[in-house]
Image: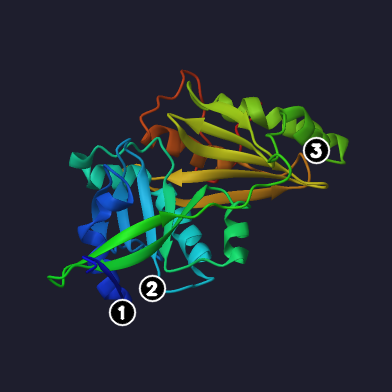
């Protein structure tokens, strides 16, 4: 006589209760931070931390659901910005805020369509199908099966260089502005570093993005990530520049405030923009 038999639950809530008791069956060392952790527009089923200190966003569906990936990516976009705040909220759980979160999806089954989509997005997405098993004593447990995603036939795009990003711009004056803005942002404070991605130049301090510079054919976008005194990313503040004469002092000022809120110190002789948001005279 079989000692285990397949079973099922009637609601997603019941499934959550089973999984919460056996998170370690999904991954050894996985620790629950909060069930249905609530942030603005983000309430993942399970917010966890793995054995390496990375935040893990786990979204669970009772059956097949094509929307689960987009739902999880929405949660990721918010939680990734708030990971330093989350690390402070759960100080005893050794969350490493320098690491970007992971996404784990759990469902009864996943379509081939969704599996293909998971390899086309950033960040990486891990998917698991589950089976519920019941003992003769009517105790219910869960078994997870890792689902292999299809492989891309071409290598993912590699980061661009600053030069190639600049050359994307068609206007010579805007190319010069693009080149001028990079050292101008870096000079806001010691320790601000620039790096090239596929679509923009980012600026980071202590591992946190504080500003960005995006090239377009006929314009340049300069933006600041507004970080408050608690290390929380509160908003993105961009300005689109289509001429060198446009004012962008408020972006530099906002970047400087974020730099200070992350523990940076302004260099001697550095001038912040005045209250009206004008650049100091050269």
**In front of the other: label 1 or label 3?**
1
Give percent across and percent down for residue 230: 31, 43
281 above or below 35?
above
Earlier in the chain: of badge 2 and badge 1, it is: 1
Quick one: 55 or 172, which is closer to the camera?
55
Earlier in the chain: of badge 1 and badge 3, it is: 1
Q: Residue drawn at (35%, 29%), measured in percent from left and top?
A: 263
Colour pattern: rainbow
Distance Cα–Cα, label 3 vs label 2 = 52 Å
- Callouts 3 and 2 close, C-beta under 8 Å: no
Secondary structure beneath disc 1? Answer: loop
Mark 3 crowdedness (10 Å alpha carbons): few <14, some 14-19, many ≥20: many
Dot 3 corresponds to which residue? 174
Give percent across and percent down for residue 66: 54, 71
Quick one: 112 or 248, which is closer to the camera?
112
Secondary structure beneath disc 2? Answer: loop
Disc sitting over residue 94 in the figure: none
Dot 1 corresponds to which residue? 11
- Callouts 2 and 1 close, C-beta under 8 Å: yes
Give percent across and percent down for residue 155: 70, 39
Q: Residue furthest bottom?
A: 10
Secondary structure beneath disc 3? Answer: helix
Give percent across and percent down for residue 58: 37, 57
Mark 1 crowdedness (10 Å alpha carbons): few <14, some 14-19, many ≥20: few
* Horizontal side, residue 122 vs residue 261: left or right: right
* Horizontal side, residue 224 vs residue 217: left or right: left
**In front of the other: label 3 or label 2?**
2
Does residue 25 appear anywhere in the picture?
A: yes
User: Which quarter of the rendering shows the C terminus?
Assistant: top right
Dot 2 corresponds to which residue? 62
* Horizontal side, residue 248 vs residue 136: left or right: right
User: Which quarter of the rendering shows the N terminus?
Assistant: bottom left
């Amino acid at each position: 006589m079989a000692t285990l038999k397949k079973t099922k639950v009637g609601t997603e809530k019941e499934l959550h209760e089973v999984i919460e008791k056996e998170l370690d069956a999904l991954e050894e060392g996985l620790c629950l931070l909060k069930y249905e952790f609530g942030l603005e527009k983000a309430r993942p089923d399970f917010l966890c931390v793995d054995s390496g200190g990375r935040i893990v966003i786990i979204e669970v569906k009772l059956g097949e659901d094509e929307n689960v990936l987009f739902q999880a990516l929405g949660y990721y976009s918010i939680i990734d910005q708030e990971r330093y705040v989350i690390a402070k909220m759960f100080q005893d759980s050794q969350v490493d805020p320098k690491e970007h979160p992971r996404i784990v999806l759990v469902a009864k089954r996943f379509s081939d369509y969704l599996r293909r989509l998971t390899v086309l997005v950033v960040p990486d997405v891990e998917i698991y199908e589950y089976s519920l098993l019941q003992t003769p004593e009517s105790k219910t447990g869960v078994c997870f099966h890792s689902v292999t995603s299809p492989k891309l036939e071409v290598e993912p795009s590699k980061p661009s260089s600053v030069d190639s990003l600049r050359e994307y711009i068609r206007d010579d004056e805007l190319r010069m502005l693009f080149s001028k803005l990079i050292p101008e942002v870096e000079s806001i404070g010691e320790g601000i570093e620039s790096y090239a991605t596929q679509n923009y130049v980012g600026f980071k301090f202590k591992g946190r993005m504080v500003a960005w510079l995006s090239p377009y054919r006929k314009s340049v976008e300069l933006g600041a990530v507004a970080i408050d005194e608690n290390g929380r990313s509160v908003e993105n503040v961009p300005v689109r520049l289509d001429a060198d004469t446009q004012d962008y002092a408020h972006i530099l000022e906002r970047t400087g405030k974020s730099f200070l809120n992350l523990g940076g110190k302004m260099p001697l002789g550095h001038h912040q923009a005045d209250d009206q948001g004008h650049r100091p005279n050269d």
